[in-house]
Image (cartoon, rainbow, N blue to C red):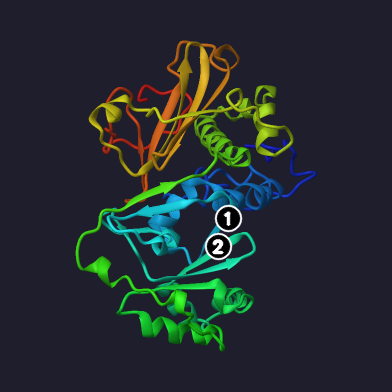
Amino acid sequence: MNKKCIYCLKTETNTVFYGREHIVSKTLWVFNIERLPEEAVCKECNSFFSDNLENKFKETSYEWYFSYMLDLKNKWKIEVDKDYLDMKADFWFNNDFFNKRFPILNEEWKIIFTPQIIIEKWNKLYIYLIDTLKITYNNKDKSKNQNEKFNRIKDIIVSVPNNCISVYWDDETHDFLVSLLKLYKDDFKITKSERETTEHLRKEWVEVRIEWKIKIKVENLRLVMKIMFNYFSYCAIKSGNEDILYKGNFDRIRNLILWKEDINIWHDIKFSKQRIMEEEENWKNFYLWHQIIFEIIWDNIVWRIVLFWIMVYEIILWNKTWIVDNDELFGCGHFFNIPNETVHSLCKNQALKWLLETDLWFWLYNNGY
């Protein structure tokens, strides 16, 4: 494959190729599969994605909030935009205090209330779990990176008054958390409003209902498009059909991803709650993974993706004739299994069945999907 960026179409004569683009963005998970080859995406586009797509997605999308709840990759900081988050936790008793707690899922996928601090600064909420504060402080002198992480946390804590810091603890962590915070902020004091405890939550099972009120932001759709185009490109490259990626038919998708054109909702991308696999809908059995497919529907090439089984996004490309000029079966699909960090080829018309004895296929044409 010649060095030519599939996004900006620049070659190595006028850009630099460094690093390899993930199919599924690192903001959502890193799976144990190959990434796009280095010559597929230039360094400039890679940096643009990180600064303009991924960072925004982290602060304002439901999918990313859900990934925070899972504490994927043991994230050291939860950062959300207050303008796009309205979370409510309803209990059998009324306690508005818990409406500001950020929920975390345990190994049984049940919501738990992890000891944490929430810092309000401007229009953002910075949330740190107690384990993060402890580990970061203990490791601050072990390396330059660890020291920089400690200083970033300390700078945020020090930059706000005490009444902008909310402390949530259980009886076992109260004293430790207070003493730990004083290591980050010398003058830290707990105010009366912050003296709350979760002791009664541990005494009996509490039914919790979490409601999120998040609008679908147009700029977040660009990252969804990028993931789909990355996956399609990977399949094209693996099957030796990478030349189609530079066709003019993809120009609008490229422009949308690179923020050069405005997105027309329902024309460029559609979204719904209808599951890609009908059998799952019928069985009322949903699983924790991403799913990406492309196929031909009514002579049109269609890309579809669902992240964490939350929202199904769909892009309808042009008529198949510009890419499929034979009778070969066109299409490919995969499950990205989050708990196990594995990827499985998707078998069409066989609900939730993957070919464990067959190598992964990433092809434009196959008989599997």
Q: Residues within 10 Å of mark 1 (few under 14, many from 20)?
A: some
Measuring from the top left, give residue 216's x and y in whole percent. Answer: 55, 39
Residue 249 against residue 28 in the figure, above or below: above
Residues at marks 2 and 1 touching, judged by CB atoms closer than 8 Å: yes
Q: Is residue 305 visible?
A: yes
Measuring from the top left, give residue 254's x and y in whole percent. Answer: 67, 33
Specify whether 193 is left or right of 170.
right
* Viewer-side residue, 12 vs 205: 205
Specify whether 261 is left or right of 24.
right
- Image quadrant occupied by the C terminus: top left
Residue 131's label in the rendered image is none
* Viewer-side residue, 54 vs 242: 54
Measuring from the top left, give residue 257's x and y in whole percent. Answer: 65, 37
Specify whether 85 is left or right of 367.
right
* Viewer-side residue, 351 vs 264: 264
Residue 208 against residue 248 in the figure, above or below: below
Give the Cα distance between marks 2 and 1.
Answer: 6 Å
Which residue is the site of mark 2? 125
Residue 81's label in the rendered image is 1
Element class at badge 2: strand
At 57% from the left and 35% from the top, the residue drawn is: 225
At 30% from the left and 80% from the top, the residue drawn is: 172
* Mark 2 or 1, nearer chain start: 1
At 45% from the left and 61% from the top, the residue drawn is: 100
